Each structure stands twice: as C-alpha cells, then as structure tokens.
Image (tube, rainbow, N blue to C red):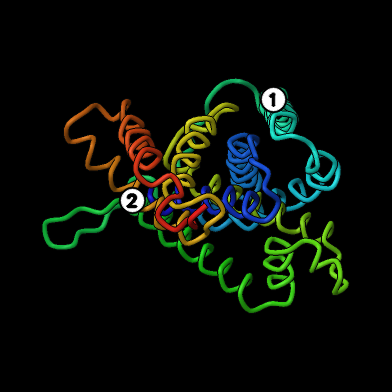
Amino acid sequence: MGGVYSLIALGLSLIFGVMKVINFAHGAMLAWGMYIALTTMRLTGIDPFFSFLMSAACLFVIGYIIQRTVVNRIMPFHESMQVIAMVGVMMVFENLAQIIWGPDPHSPHTKYSLSTVWLGSVMIDVPRLLAFGIAILIATLVFLFLKYTDLGKAIRASADNRTGALLVGTDVNKVYGVCFGIGAACVGVAGSLLVPLIPTSPHVGFPFKLTSFAIVILGGMGSLPGAMLGGLIIGVAESLGTVFIPSSLKQIISFSIMVLILLFRPQGLFGGKG
C-alpha cells in the first residue's frame, strides 16, 4: 500500500510543484481510474494489473482537458478561489461516476485475488506485491522522463522559473497541460492497481486523497522524492499501527505523523528552508 500511496502522492506533488495548484479532485480521479480498469476487465477480461495503461491514458486526456479549461484560468487567482474551483471539479467527477456506474460498490474477482507466495515463514499477498512493484516502476519512469527528456526538462524549467521558460520559447501552457495530465495518469494507474484490493465506489478516493495530502506534507510540498519516501513511510506506519489499533482507524497514524511534521519540520523531509 505504501507503493500505491507514493504513486498517488507523486501525482499530487507534481501538479503542485509545477503549477502551485492543489488538485482537490485527485481522489475523484482515483475512483475514475478504478472504474476504467473495472470496465476494461469486464469488456476484455484483462486483469487490472495489466490494463493500467488504459486507466493512465484516459486519465491523462482528462487531466489535460481539465488543466486547459479550468486550472489554466484559475492559476492567477487567490488560493481560496482555486480551492473552490477544484472542489467543484471533484463534485462533478464523483457525481458523474455515480450516474455512469451507479452508487453500489463493486468487488471483482481477479486471477490473482487469492494468490500468495511464501518466503520462509512469511506469507506475501500477490496482488499487493504486484501493486507495489508496478507503482515503483511507474514512479521510476516518471522520474526518468522528467530528468532526461526535453519535455521533462521543460516541465522542470517551467516549475523553476515561468518567465525564464517563456523567454527561451517554451509553450508553458502546453507544458502545464502535459504536467497535469501526467499527475492524473499517475493516480489513474494507482486506481487500476487498487481494483483487486478494495471495493470500487464513487467516493472511494476521498480517504486516499486525505492520506496523500499527509504524505505530500511529510515529504515536502512539491518534492517528488519526498512524495515517494513519504508514501512508503505512511504505508509501513499504518500497517504497523494496526497491531495496536483497529485497521478502520489507521488514518490516525498518518495524520499524527502529519501533525508532528507540521509542528517540528513544517517544510517536510525534503522541503527547502522556506
């Protein structure tokens, strides 16, 4: 789960780090990623662990359109107005999901649902192992894309200095659209990986959105390595915490860590001095 948390937080942190906009629709996009994977499985029989590219592609297109039509217009506005607009997008997505797929939760049976592997006396759940491996792979590919491709360098340049990027001829608005699309694609992949693990419903993304906020604060706002490490820390902490408290209360652990970070290191583990 820590790997999936990291992928969700990576998308959220990428969008904030480049555009300084908090995507409150992130949880609703996660639910759409789950529904797209679920629909693909029902139409083609392809397991969600192998159809995550479909969720990623659909969410990339949706994210790009949202950025060009909504986010691009609200970026100059005050943060409170940005929040209202993104909460509105969230509500539209949640209600559209309810109209299209219905309000009832879905728990499909996949080929790997009950599979396990043993390492000595330790039992490992195969769906969670696959989810972790694919999440880390996708996150690594995003890092490589941002570091070594021309478009990735343009994204980093636009995040660092918008005016400088404009002066050297970068189409910053297009770069922002691609960046938002990549962030949405990350959460789309995470949604696909979650289909075999938890029931799919229109509001399933809300607790994950809250946890991803805690992870981004823990790692440092806008820090991609911080989002990855923060996700793993929160995932392990929640799992260990269920030894002492019921699993339904596991968010107490993540938000307790967030409060401690805000009190003693508000810039996060990888944040700057500001």
Measure the alpha-carbon separation of dots 1 and 2. 30 Å
Left or right of 39? Residue 273 is left
Please indicate whether residue 248 sits to the left or right of residue 246 in the image: right
Residue hosting label 2: 233
Q: Amino acid at mark 1?
A: Met
Instruction: State the residue position of label 1.
Output: 91
SS assignment at label 1: helix
Tell me the SS state at disc 2: helix
Q: Position of residue 242 (x, y in %)?
A: 23, 35
Judge whether 143 appears above or below 108 on screen: below
Seen from the viewer's position, the closer of residues 117 and 254 is: 254
Residue 69, quarter of picture: top right
Dot 1 alpha-carbon crowd within 10 angstroms: few under 14, some 14 to 19, many 20 or more? some
The answer to whether residue 212 is above or below residue 272 is above
Residue that appears at 86% across and 65% down: 171
Residue 13: x and y in percent read 57, 51
Q: Nearer the viewer, mark 1 or mark 2?
A: 2
Q: Position of residue 157 (x, y in %)?
A: 71, 68
Residue for point 49% across, 47% down: 216
